[in-house]
Amino acid sequence: MNTETKVGAFVLGCMALLVVTVYYASHEQWGSHAVSYKTYLRYAGGVGPGSDVLFGGITVGRVNSVKAWNRDATRIEISFEVKDGTPLNEKSVAKLGSVSLMSSPAISITTGAEDAPRLKPGQAVPSQETVSLDDMTRKLSGIADGAEDLITQIQAELKGISGQTQTLLANLNDVTGTTNRRQIAEILGQVNTLLASQSPKIDRITSQMELVSRDADSLVNRMGPLVDHADATIASVNGTVAGISRTVEETRDPIKQDLAQLQSTMEQAKAVMAGIQTLVQSNQENVRQTMENIRVASENLDQLTDQVKQRPWSLVRIRQPKDRKVPQ
């Protein structure tokens, strides 16, 4: 036997030993200590015999066969085996998965629930479909198409908003221009001048109204005794007329009527004066409030004038811009 034959025999022996070792190791790991289960999926992309079976992310078995289910042509029957003692239960869910993006597809089974009944060997594990790459690509294409339309619409709306913003800024520039600021300052100055010039008159009117109220009170007080004296005079006239002879009888009735009219007139005058007094007293507080409101409005206008002069940008911005830092 030459050297080449010996080398060839050695290589064949090593290969046979390797095959036996692999078969023995796999048989010891999955064969005599493995339990078979099944699951059914509509999409089993990339899964084939020998693919890993994961339980909670841990490799616990391998796929034995992948074929179309004879009972339902829309489903794929996947037979696999896992290590004996793997706690598959009725709440466990099998789905298509992988350990990482670069790894081969595998059957991933969730751990389920602790109190759920355990599955018996040969039973089917409940399954859950996953989104395939084709479906994902189709959805992304639809999203991209919709995004293009949305971007086009947004661009059109942004053009309109930009135009409106420019118009608004132009209007604000006109409003806050030098001419308008000068006019506002002149108006506020005129208002201040008007208030300053009219304040004494308003004070005099208020004082006169108070004097009128006091005079009305005094007049009403004076009219009271006069009416009482008129009543006494009418009574005495009635007594006097009763004692006069029949020759004066004809002149008594007109005098009596005149005195009655005089009494009625005095009563009406008394009622009118009382109404004037009530009106003046009820409106005195309103007049004071009016004066106070005019004074507050004058102060607010002064504050607005100062604010516009000092910070004209406050008509456009809500917040005050930050002070610029002093360069170091």
Image (cartoon, rainbow, N blue to C red):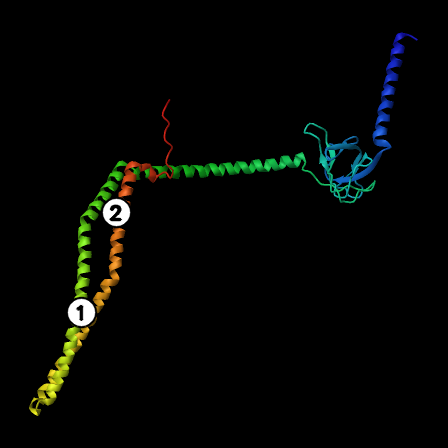
Q: Quadrant of the C terminus?
A: top left
Q: Residue furthest left?
A: 247
Residue that badge 1 annotates? 221
Q: Earlier in the sequence, mark 2 or mark 1?
A: 1
Residue type, mark 1 in image: Asn
Question: In the rendering, which numbered label is found on residue 83?
Answer: none
Residue 47 seen from this side? no
Q: Nearer the viewer, residue 323 or 43?
A: 323
Label 1 secondary element: helix
* Residue 181 pos. (x, y %): 26, 39
Quadrant for residue 58, please give it: top right
* Residue 238 pos. (x, y %): 13, 85
- Residue at image position (17%, 54%) is 204
Residue 227 drawn above or below residue 250: above
Residue 25 seen from this side? yes
Residue mark closest to the camera, 2 vs 1: 1
Q: Is residue 53 left or right of residue 253?
A: right
* Residue 313 pos. (x, y %): 33, 37
Quadrant for residue 316, please give it: top left
Q: Residue furthest right?
A: 1
Q: Is residue 114 left or right of residue 274?
A: right
- Residue at image position (14%, 77%) is 229
Residue that badge 2 annotates? 298
Residue 154 drawn above or below residue 298: above
- Neighbor class of circle 1 (other Cα within 10 Å; few <14, some 14-19, many 20+) is some
- Residue at image position (22%, 46%) is 191
Residue type, mark 2 in image: Ser
Q: CA distance from mark 2 to mark 1?
A: 41 Å
Q: Quadrant of the N terminus?
A: top right
- Residue at image position (17%, 66%) is 218
